Image (cartoon, rainbow, N blue to C red):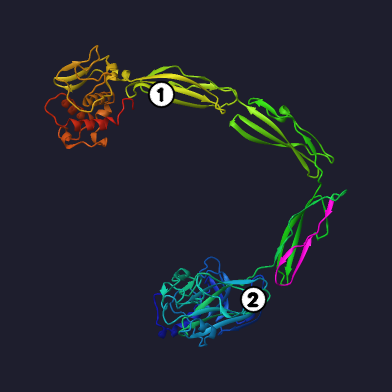
Amino acid sequence: MKNNILTKSGFFGLVFVLVCSISASAQLNVSSSSNAATLAAKLVGPGVTITNATLNCPTGAAGTFIAGPGVNEVGIREGVLLTSGNVSIAAHSNNVGNATVNNGAPGNAVLTALIPTYVTYDACMLEFDLESIGNQVSFEYVFASEEYEEYYCTQFNDVFGFFVSGPNPGGGTYTDRNIAIVPGTANTPVSINNVGPSSCMGIDNHTLYQNMSGATTLQYDGKTKVLQAKIDLKPCKKYRFKLGVADAGDHILDSGIFLKEGSFVSTPPVIVCSPALNLNNEPGKCSAVATYTPTVSADCPVTATCNPPTGSTFPVGTTTVTCKATDQLGNTATCTFTVTVKDVEKPVITCPAAVTVSCEASTLPNAVGIPAATDNCGLTPLSHIDATVAGSCAHEFTINRTWTALDVHGNSSTCLHVIKVEDKKSPVITCPVNITVTCDTTVAKTGMATAVDNCDPVLDFSRHDVHASGDCEWFCIVERHFTATDDCRNTSSCVQIITKNVAPLIETVLPITVGVSNSTVTIPTGKAECVVQWLPHTGTVPKGLVFKNFTVGADCLPGTNPTDPGGRIINPLFGEALKLNIIAKLKPAVGTRKLDTFGCTIPPVIIHYLAPDPDVNELLRVTNTALGNISVQPHLNELLGVLHCINGQLNICQP
């Protein structure tokens, strides 16, 4: 839509200025023509002929168009243009909203019949007789108009029609049958109000419409997308075609129909060749005579020929025959088939007896046997194809070796040699020595088993650890079971004993004292093994330490602070505090790490006892105070929860 819109009653002064100002550099080139035969011939494609063309259009209303290189805003590159004004209107940028030429010409009755509540004007009609070789013709077109946008869904309803008259293949006769209909409808004609930017009187085909505001090569304000019309015909029968466009409601604001060059197409004749012929050679000859007749589908006169012709003599081997059908317009169709003549005498071949070999033995023909073969006409070298049938494992399988003896004429005979391959030996495996480690129990530290096998160069190693005893955060014994398996599931196993004991690591930070005042437990140098025995704790109820200062002695007990029958600390607050004290001494950076970096929820009752912006060392101070029973502290469960959350993110063996 243009910005400087004029009313229909006041635009006539623009008409001649517009027509005379068509840009010579426009990318859409149009040329007016009044030669009906030339215009009609431009529409014709393969399989179609036209005669008796007539043109009933005002001067300049009909012609041809071609889009230049680059932009193609019409949607069709080249063809015939029929307008209700002048073809020169189309080839201009979309710079005004009311480009028009008033031809003062009458409408057309068949076009008016498509939109019975309107009167048509300035009709442009191209008519011709058409004959088709095939049983259907189709064409592509675009309907464009200056009526669009401003006068959509008003009393102005410019229309396009494509009418066909002639025999109906389904019975009866077409009489001005309109086939330019809106896709998806039974008979809705293509007009302004039937295809536009929105819904009009209950009809909505906006998906088929394109607003051309801002177009640089096309003057019309809007257009349809490329549409197609088609109709079934009787081959080689004459039909009358009428194509036309007209203004509706008044003489002004032009519409145009762009018809694709070569759009009227039909199908060429169809030819189906004989099936492939397979013949045996005639006795004493290396050839045979073949006869055949192709099948041609066409209602019009068609000539069919084949090369070589039927009745020819064909040599042993395969020959391709090409058949060609030509209709009265010169349209052609081809098909091919083969004639194969065979020498039917086969060679004689005998395979060696079946054999069983070990997987490390060779299965090449020279090792397991080669067939004997003879033929009356001479043999090409023997060939074989191996098909391996999997057995119960990769190195136990059966080779079905099919040998082929081929004579010079392609006759062949085969025999089967069966070769069975077995693997029954287990790998030999050696485990790494037993080892005691502080933290690292990975294979890189403790060692990997090795093994060798008679057939499988790359064995499958598996291992699994059996937790024999202890808690592996502090002390445990692990049995590492290694298994070597070859491809045939022959296995060998061994066991490595790995003892993990973090006592040497704890010993580096002793002595450690947990608690304060008169409620403490001190672990002196040389007692790391006691800590390993105590942890992890086994209780759930936090308490302060016994009101006494203890130094761990030879009995390896935390004084009278309770332990379970296995020697583990029961008091969870004591256990969590001891773990965090050890880690903070081992890793000073943990002691100075701020508590808010752990993501743990610290209840207000705990925050109350902590210094501002507390770190782990500050938490240990409060914990030791709580263990020391300095005062009645009803927050031990909350404190235990904070310690448990932080310790859950730490491990004595972590870096």
Q: Which residue carries the number 1 mark?
A: 466
Q: Could you say where residue 646 lies in the image, as x and y percent from the top left?
A: 26, 31
Q: Could you say where residue 532 lies in the image, as x and y percent from the top left?
A: 29, 19
| Res 110 → quadrant | bottom right
The N terminus lies in which quarter of the figure?
A: bottom left
- Is 295 a magenta residue? yes
Q: Could you say where residue 278 lies in the image, as x and y percent from the top left?
A: 77, 52
Question: Which range of residues does the magenta coloring cover?
Answer: 287-307
Question: Which sits in the foreground, 612 or 302?
Answer: 302
Report the disc number at residue 329.
Answer: none
Q: Which residue carries the number 2 mark?
A: 41
The C terminus lies in which quarter of the figure?
A: top left
Q: Is residue 160 left or right of residue 413?
A: left
- Is 218 a magenta residue? no
- Would you say residue 84 is visible in this rendering? no
Amino acid type of the residue tagged 1 in the rendering? Val
Q: Around disc 1, counting alpha carbons within 10 Å, would you say few (fewer than 14), some (14 to 19), or many (20 or more)? A: few
Question: Which sits in the foreground, 316 or 3?
Answer: 316
Q: Is residue 324 left or right of residue 520?
A: right
* Of the image marks 1 and 2, the number of the one nearer the N terminus: 2
